[in-house]
Amino acid sequence: MNRRIILTALNNNEKLWYEQFIPFISTLKKTDYEGDIGVIDYGITSEAKDVLAKNNVLVFAPENCVSNLALDRHFSTACIAQTYHYDELVLFDADIWFPSHQFTLFENIKDKEYLYACPDNQVSGFIYECVKDSPQAQYSHLYIGEKLRQILDKYQYIWQLGLVAGYAKAWLNYKEYLIKLCQHPEFSMDYGVDTTLLNLYSAETDKVKPLHKKYNCIPNWEISFLYQNGKFRSFSIEEETVEAMHTPGDFRLEGKYSLAKLDSEKLIKLGKTYRLKDYPIYHILRESLTSYAIEERYTTLKLEYANANYIAIKTLNNTDVSQTLNALCIDVTGYSKICLSNPHSYEINLIYSYHDIPNFDLCNVTYVKKEGLTPFLTKENKYYSVVLKPSEKLYFYTDSLDIERTRTRWVFENIRLI
């Protein structure tokens, strides 16, 4: 049985850890892949190393042959193959996640002399920007353009660098090529140099073979979504189930292809074991939330309980995010559950909304629920009106992976808590 490993590279960036690496590692671990998983360490913290060790993820020192992380990880992958005697190695970007239980990529890595990559549907300008152009240079913009056209003529696309795979021999051959190419003064270690050099390697040696788009699926292909009972289940492309979804920055922000937006509760359930620290859930004293002197004429609600990783309460004396003056405002992060009830013998009407907070992302999960009913599908920055019968309870719920960088602000109009 061949020794296999899947690698990605990380630096000391907590936001990247939570937004990219946790979806990557938590979904990869749920596939049927059974080989090793490793991280090439470009400065991750001791806390991150402890989390990786606890979850059986290997950590490898980088080669630091060049200053560009994206390119140096290719040198490092080749050296990992040689030093640790791996037969087959796959290097992924960390902003990829795995929506399918199946992981069949290694079945397609057959030729030991070739690297394998997936197609890109655009030729980005950064391919040229890492080259100092000169008519006398061996690798001028003109020469690179000719080589890209050579690849386009053969495959109709160039290579996308979110995934590079191959046997150890192919990686070591590529490393030798990179050593020679990096000696040319026209190449700078700017963004995109890894893409430029792999495509040059393909054109000059013909030693890169294509993989199906499903193994590194970028969102600007034509992708279909499969839902079951209203919940996301999978993507497909060209009638094949997508096994690895690549969500670069703009697409992550949009959220359409992001696990954090498609199934945030699944992400939190799988991802909590990869948090960089533990966060206790506090049982909030009722007195700390009911001591705000809002006018007596406002509707009274009973605070049954409040549990949260973090909670803060205040009144708003402006109408930036509320319809009235002195609206009650409760900020929460991470896991939180606030239960309010109607203490009166008659029905009352509750108006609420929720918002993000400047410099924070919204919690991954935010919803409202009545007892025995499915959660309300509410939206940010919208006002909702709920009628509560006598003694009826209403639950306000949030959850998120990244407690330091997420907040949800609940705003309640014209109410007092008792």
Image: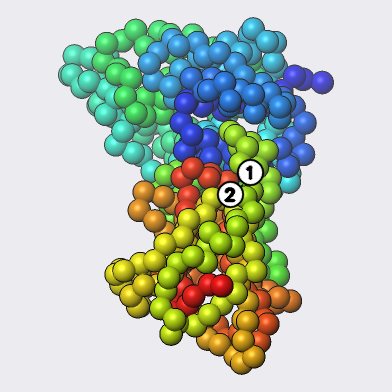
For the N terminus, the quadrant is top right
Q: Please state which of residues 251 and 408 is positioned toward the viewer in this rendering.
A: 408
Q: Residue furthest bottom?
A: 346
Q: Identify the residue at horizontal 30%, vertical 17% (top origin).
A: 187
* Relative horizontal placement of residue 133, taking residue 199 as reference (left or right): left
Amino acid bearing label 2 = Asn
Which quadrant of the figure contains the C terminus?
bottom right
Residue at the location (40% across, 13% down)? 66
Vertical relation: 248 (above or below) 223: above
What percent of the width, then of the height, locates residue 75? 50, 14
Q: Which mark is residue 280?
A: 1
Classed neighbour count for the residue bearing mark 2: other residues with Cα under 10 Å, few (<14), some (14–19), many (≥20): some
Residue 161 lies, in percent from the top left, at 48, 32
Position above or below: 170 against 17 = above
- The number of numbered discs placed on residues in the rendered structure image is 2
Q: Residue at x 41, y 78 (%)?
A: 295
Report which quarter residue 163 is drawn in: top right
The local secondary structure at tag 2 comes to strand
Residue corresponding to mark 2 = 309
